[in-house]
Structures are given as structure tokens and as C-alpha cells.
Image: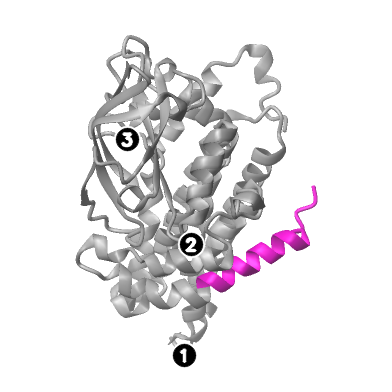
Amino acid sequence: MDWTLSPEQRRWRDLARAYATEVVAPRAAGLDAQVDPAEAFSWELVEAASDCGLRLAPLPAEFGGGGTDFLTNAIMLEEIAAADLGTSVVLAQTWKFAQLLMELGTPDQRERWLRRLAANRRGLLAASFTEPQAGSDNVLPYDGVEGGMKTSARRVDGGWIINGHKAYISNSNRADTILCYARTRPDLPVRAGVSSFIVPADSPQVRFGPVHDKIGERLANNAEIFYEDVFVPEEDLLGEENQALADVARLLRGSNAYAAACTLGVARTAFTKGLRYARHRVQGGVPIVEHGDIAAQLGEMYARLDMARTYVFRAAWAADHASPFDPKLAATPKLVASQISFDVTRGSLEMFGALGVMRETGMSKLLRDATIFLHSDGANTVMRKKIAADLRGRSDAQLDQLWDW
């Protein structure tokens, strides 16, 4: 395998790096410190992403994008997350659901909704899956008809009426357009009875709750959504009726790698800061990097982080090229990267001793950010169960191919 980045990938990486270092990094700490979580979001950062071509990078040029693939997107998200996790999540959510709309949408839907998105310099996307009492049941998904989301879409003349309550939705209160996932067959398990609908966020029947006050990833807003007799015309059903979760599994192959790349960016910055401090902090007459236990810890952290990074890039590459795509790669990258990133970030903070918990070092923000993907985009416990379900479902003959790429 040739892991060398192409000239085009390097161009996008450098663009994302410049955006991260020149635009995001100088503002991130101040926004993160806002007491009101809604005030931690910045339209200035979104508009800057529009101006440099990042906001809709994965879309074709006709819709304001650059046609970037899953791997290039993962590379860019790592660069942006190295400056701030929340900003990378704002873009990642928009990217993956724009890709989904591009893949599933009819020509009419693409023309109406992607053009609307491209024309709005602040245009972001959100997708509402999670509910206060239905999170992991949607991800596994749970086989019983009583499990999973309860938001309903009822057929009426000319379309559907949606009612329900979603929670923890990234970009929800900031979105131009929302993909709403709702039960269209409540008599079937969630995997067989959910459909996706395109809903304008400015619909008068869509209401948003307060922004959730998260410990990390604060530059991305998450809020509740209330759908109250929202009418969606027939032409804005996205994909086939009752097949929404299958479509997500098939088309958002790179979503887990996106989350993993974001958390890697956090750990990368934490490790670099810890290493730089260890090279200059003198204790016992020498820089602490020369103490054997510190040197060994740094070596272990670097090896684990680089291992996770390589694996994430492989998963993103597979999302672009592998046929068939291994479903475990829709769970393992985030599981591996989030655990390693948290460990590396915590270890890097400890390089500073007591200074590590002081806000001025920036390490406390990084540690808070590093906790997010232990839970977000599917709790890691659920990721393990998804992997185990794939393993459990294989025949003895298929086990012989378990290690084949």
C-alpha cells in the first residue's frame, strides 16, 4: 500500500491546517470559556470555512464543493480538530449529511436542498436520530418493536406529519436543513421501520430547546428538537420508505472514521504540548524528557497514537475503495481512536505536573474535549457490542476469512 498523500490531498490538508491555525486556534479558548453554551458557537468560523472552500468540501463543484473523498476528509478533520474539536464536529456533521443527501437524493432534492445549502454562507446540516429515551437502541439497533426512536411520521394527503422529541443533536439549533429520522412502521423493529425526511430548520412547527451544556466540544452546539405536527411533502422523503437505517449504514461508511479523526486531532495537540514541555522543564538537573520513566511514557504514547492514526486512515480509505466494506470498520475506528486519544491526552497533561490542571496551559480543555468521543457517535460500549454482533453472526467458514482485507 502506498500511504503517500497525493498532491490534491496535501493541498486540502494544507488548506485545513491554515484555517485551523490562523482562524480557529486564536478564538477557540475564548469561545470554549463562555458560560452560556450557546455563546461558544461562532458564525465567524463557519463563514471563514465558506470563504476558503471547506464548508462543503465533499460535494461536487456544482454544489459549492471540491469533491473530496472520505480519506481526504478525515485528514482535514484531524487538522481542524488539532485547533478545536467542536469546530471539526460542526463541519463533519455537515459533510457527512451533505454526502448522504448527495447519494440518496433525487435530482430534484439535490437541486433544491444542496443549492439552498451552497447559497447560504452559514449553511449547516444536522440529522436527528437520538431521543431522550432512545440512543443506543438506534445504534445497535435493538430488535424489539418497543425499542428505539419514538418520533413518528404519519401519512397524510400529499406527504407526512412528523411528531417527536430529539435530544443531543449536533448543529440542530444552527442548521439550515435537518434530516429527521422517524418511525413510519411502529409495528416493526427500528431497523426495518424508520424513514428519513428533509426538513427546513426554519419551519414554524420545528422548535429547539436550550443548548446542552457539555464539558467539552463546546464550540459545537447540541440541542433538543421538537417536531410538532411538521408537514413534509411526499417529495422530501429521502431514500426509500422504511429503509433509512440501512441507507445510513451503507452510505455513511466514513462517519466513524470522521469521528475518530476528530479525536485524534485533540490528542495530537496534547501530545505535542506535553513533549515540548518535557524537553524544557528541568527537574533533577536535567530536562524531564531525559528521565527514563518520562521517556518511556512518551515513547508509548507516540506509538499508540500513531497506530490509531494509521488505522483510522485505513478505515477512511476502505470507505472509498473496499468492496464489500467491512461493517466492523463502521465501529472500530472511533472505539480505538477515542480510547487511545483520551489516554494520550491524560498522559500528556501529567507531563506538566500541577501546572497541567491550570487553565493557562490549555491542557484542561484538551482533556475535556478528549472525553467526548468516548460517548458521542455511539457510546464505546455499544461499539463493542456492534463488533461482537458481526463476529457472532459469522459462520465457521467465514471465520477463516476474518483477517483478510
Q: Are marks 2 and 1 in contact (CB under 8 Å)?
A: no
Instruction: For marks 2 and 1, give the CA distance.
Output: 36 Å
Where is residue 201? Give x, y as percent.
Answer: 33, 44
Residue shown at the point (45%, 74%) measured from the top left:
25
- The mark found on residue 285 in the picture is 1
In the rendered image, the quadrant that contains the C terminus is top right
Relative to 239, does residue 132 appear above or below in the rendering? below
Residue shown at the point (57%, 41%) measured from the top left:
254
Residue shown at the point (36%, 78%) measured from the top left:
361
Label 3: few (<14), some or many (≥20) within 10 Å? many
Determine which residue is flagged by label 2. 81
* Residue in the foreground of this view, choosing between 138 and 230: 230
Relative to 113, does residue 163 appear above or below in the rendering? above
Amino acid type, label 1: Gly
Amino acid type, label 2: Ala
Where is residue 18? Give x, y as percent.
Answer: 57, 73
Dot 3: element: loop
3 vs 1, front mark: 3
Amino acid type, label 3: Thr
Where is residue 137? Give x, y as percent.
Answer: 34, 26
Where is residue 126? Give x, y as percent.
Answer: 40, 44
Relative to 48, does residue 386 appear above or below in the rendering? above
* Residue in the foreground of this view, choosing between 88 and 318: 88
Taking the magenta stretch, the answer to whether it contains residue 170 is no
Determine which residue is flagged by label 3. 130
